[in-house]
């Protein structure tokens, strides 16, 4: 209907750039990218410096992997409107997709300078910092904690609940996520949805899926048939979702997204459930004091870890992950080295994880194995300039580009999984290790070499490989990582034997034992509930501390104001009565906070809020572009 109205508007006014732009937004949301590009280009033919259309065209090009064209469009949008905050956010997503994390972080921070309340940029920045965090200090923890404290102030918190404090009654477990479709998270949440004891754990799913697929429908059917509840919450305000959670009398609310796309941390900030948990979707603390616990294991987060978390860690007895393989995976193929006559190393991790240090180590390995090849697959490799930059970097490290195969995104899941038949040995990334890619690699019979580190994001591969029985492939240093890869490459017969047995080894391991995993998860939930029944609530304690800190700050401010007034009175008594400063003049005027940014003039709104052109989205005026995007495991979405 909206398309009809906009086309009607264009019929009466063919020179309306805004209508063309908004039509493009609708087509983009419907995945008709070619039509969206056509509309944005039409808008720009009418209004060449229309910053929204320049930005939106850049967003579509980013989705299509046309990185150079995307950068050109977004940079033109910024040139046309230097205070266009969302354009900087989108530039950050573009840089992240291209593997330029430092530039990505700088773009997010520029967005936050213009709009300190930009949720997209704030969360994107936190996510991006994980890719380069060596775990040597608390800076990343501090960044998450400060974000969480500020975010909490945007929401009112519930501090009491009607849920009966009966220790061993059936529990209501809520799972909230936008990723109940063919997405990395879905491979790990399927086990509990399938194996929960629905008589003792009533499951309520809050699905924020933007576009449902066959997997979404399968999950929904499974939950409903077992007696659970499925609520579609896409497009519903986060505070309203919190109300639904309270109405459903959820005892334990588990969020599966962290700071990735379309998260519902706003719902969690309202504290709608007496116990709140974060799990799977994010490799670090959320920073949100409203969340009681973070689920992990003793290998991903060792008991003596120095990494700090706002949440309290709960370690499951085996792995914190349980992988449900795709039924579309297809068979394990023979080790390609047997027919090729050479070893092929590979990685299907996203480009942001392949840091300069990773490339140095990979080049060492390839240079030490004569005639070996490297195959790397990720979305940006459909862009010639990014391919050339990647190859040039490896050539500078001594690896000829002719020995490297770069593959773009493969859309069909079966084809993606069968692409593992191209490699003999999988090389994990560091410091930010792979998760889904590691599980896929092992399931397809390809052994993976990983490197342990000091924080959770470094050690996911350690947990997975150890629990599958391949702890011998975990390195502690770069030299050991190289040595392990060379050791695997030196014995093709052993590689073939391992490849034949690896799928069965994985299926029989705790990493794929959905029944046992879910019993352990339910036991953890029950322990959390017992603690709550005994009056132990980590989030409530934190919120009380924060409230106390706010009271202390308020008291200090009042004391400072009182002292300032006393000093001002004393100065006035000592000055000549002829020269008296009026309380409303600029000399004595207190600065006014506009959008949490200090402005020296009380009658002047923050420049960005005033100057930013409003965007018409489906006929509704909005001060922000509809294209601000958060990242989700290597994909960008609105």
Image (cartoon, rainbow, N blue to C red):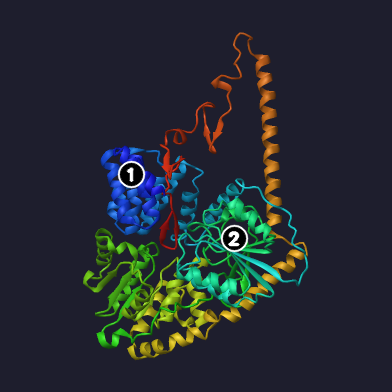
Q: Report the Cα–Cα distance between label 2 and label 1.
A: 47 Å
Residue 393 pos. (x, y %): 28, 63
**Quadrant in which residue 66 is drawn:** bottom left
Q: Residues within 10 Å of mark 1 (few under 14, many from 20)?
A: many
Above-or-below relation of 483 to 91? below
Looking at this rendering, what residue extends furthest in the top direction?
578
Residue 184 vs residue 496, the one in the foreground: 184
Residue 269 vs residue 464, the one in the foreground: 269
Instruction: Return the disc, 2 or 1, that comes first in the chain's sequence.
Output: 1
Q: Which mark is residue 20?
A: 1
**Quadrant in which residue 171 is drawn:** bottom right
Q: Is residue 505 left or right of residue 367?
A: right
Q: Nearer the viewer, mark 2 or mark 1?
A: 1
Say which residue appears at 53% left-offset and 52% top-offset. 143
Residue 239 pos. (x, y %): 61, 51
Say which residue appears at 47% left-offset and 64% top-offset. 212
Which residue is denoted by mark 2 in the rendering? 309
Residue 119 pos. (x, y %): 50, 49
**C-beta proximity under 8 Å, tags 2 and 1:** no
Q: Residues within 10 Å of mark 2 (few under 14, many from 20)?
A: many
């Amino acid at each position: 209907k909206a398309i009809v109205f906009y086309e009607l508007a264009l019929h009466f006014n063919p020179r309306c750039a805004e209508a063309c732009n908004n039509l493009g937004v609708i087509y983009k949301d419907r995945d008709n990218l070619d039509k969206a590009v056509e509309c944005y280009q039409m808008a720009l033919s009418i209004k060449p410096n229309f910053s929204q259309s320049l930005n939106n065209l850049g967003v579509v090009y980013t989705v299509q992997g046309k990185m150079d064209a995307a950068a050109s469009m977004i940079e033109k949008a910024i040139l046309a409107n230097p205070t266009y905050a969302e354009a900087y956010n989108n530039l950050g997503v573009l840089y992240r997709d291209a593997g330029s994390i430092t530039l990505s972080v700088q773009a997010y921070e520029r967005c936050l300078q213009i709009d300190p309340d930009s949720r997209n940029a704030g969360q994107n920045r936190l996510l991006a910092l994980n890719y380069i965090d060596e775990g040597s200090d608390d800076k990343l923890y501090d960044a998450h904690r400060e974000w969480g404290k500020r975010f909490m102030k945007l929401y009112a918190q519930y501090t009491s609940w009607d849920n009966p404090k009966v220790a061993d009654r059936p529990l209501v477990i809520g799972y909230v996520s936008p990723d109940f479709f063919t997405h990395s998270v879905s491979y790990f949440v399927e086990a509990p949805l399938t194996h929960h004891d629905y008589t003792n754990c009533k499951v309520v799913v809050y699905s924020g899926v933007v576009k449902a697929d066959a997997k979404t429908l399968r999950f929904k059917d499974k939950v409903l048939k077992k007696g659970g509840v499925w609520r579609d919450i896409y497009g519903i305000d986060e505070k309203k979702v919190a109300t639904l959670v309270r109405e459903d009398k959820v005892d334990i609310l588990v969020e599966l997204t962290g700071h990735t796309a379309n998260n519902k941390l706003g719902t969690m900030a309202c504290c709608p459930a007496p116990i709140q948990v974060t799990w799977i979707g994010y490799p670090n603390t959320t920073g949100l004091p409203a969340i009681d616990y973070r689920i992990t294991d003793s290998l991903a987060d060792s008991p003596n870890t120095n990494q700090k978390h706002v949440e309290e860690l709960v370690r499951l007895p085996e792995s914190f992950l349980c992988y449900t393989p795709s039924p579309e995976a297809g068979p394990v193929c023979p080790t390609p080295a047997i027919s090729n006559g050479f070893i092929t190393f590979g990685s299907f991790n996203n480009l942001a994880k392949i840091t300069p240090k990773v490339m140095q180590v990979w080049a060492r390995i390839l240079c030490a194995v004569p005639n070996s090849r490297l195959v790397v697959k990720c979305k940006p490799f459909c862009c010639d300039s990014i391919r050339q930059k990647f190859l040039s970097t490896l050539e500078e490290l001594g690896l000829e580009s002719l020995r490297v195969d770069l593959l773009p995104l493969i859309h069909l899941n079966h084809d993606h999984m069968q692409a593992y038949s191209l490699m003999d040995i999988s090389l994990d990334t560091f410091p930010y290790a792979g998760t889904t890619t590691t599980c896929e690699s092992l399931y397809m019979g390809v052994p993976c070499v990983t490197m342990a580190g000091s924080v959770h994001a470094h050690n996911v591969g350690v947990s997975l490989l150890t629990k599958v029985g391949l702890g011998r492939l975990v390195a502690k240093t770069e030299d050991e990582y190289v040595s392990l890869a060379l050791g695997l490459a030196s014995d093709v017969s052993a590689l073939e034997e391992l490849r034949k047995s690896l799928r069965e080894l994985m299926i029989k391991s705790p990493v794929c034992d959905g029944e046992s995993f879910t019993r352990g998860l339910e036991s953890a939930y029950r322990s959390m509930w017992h603690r709550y029944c005994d009056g132990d609530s980590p989030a409530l304690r934190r919120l009380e501390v924060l409230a106390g800190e706010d009271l202390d700050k308020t008291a200090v401010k009042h004391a400072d104001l009182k002292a300032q007034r006393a000093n001002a009175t004393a100065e006035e008594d000592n000055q000549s009565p002829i020269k008296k400063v009026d309380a409303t003049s600029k000399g004595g005027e207190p600065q006014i906070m506009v959008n949490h940014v200090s402005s020296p003039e009380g009658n002047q709104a923050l420049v960005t809020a005033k100057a930013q052109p409003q965007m018409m989205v489906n006929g509704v005026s909005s001060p922000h572009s509809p294209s601000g995007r958060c990242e989700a495991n290597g994909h960008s979405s609105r």
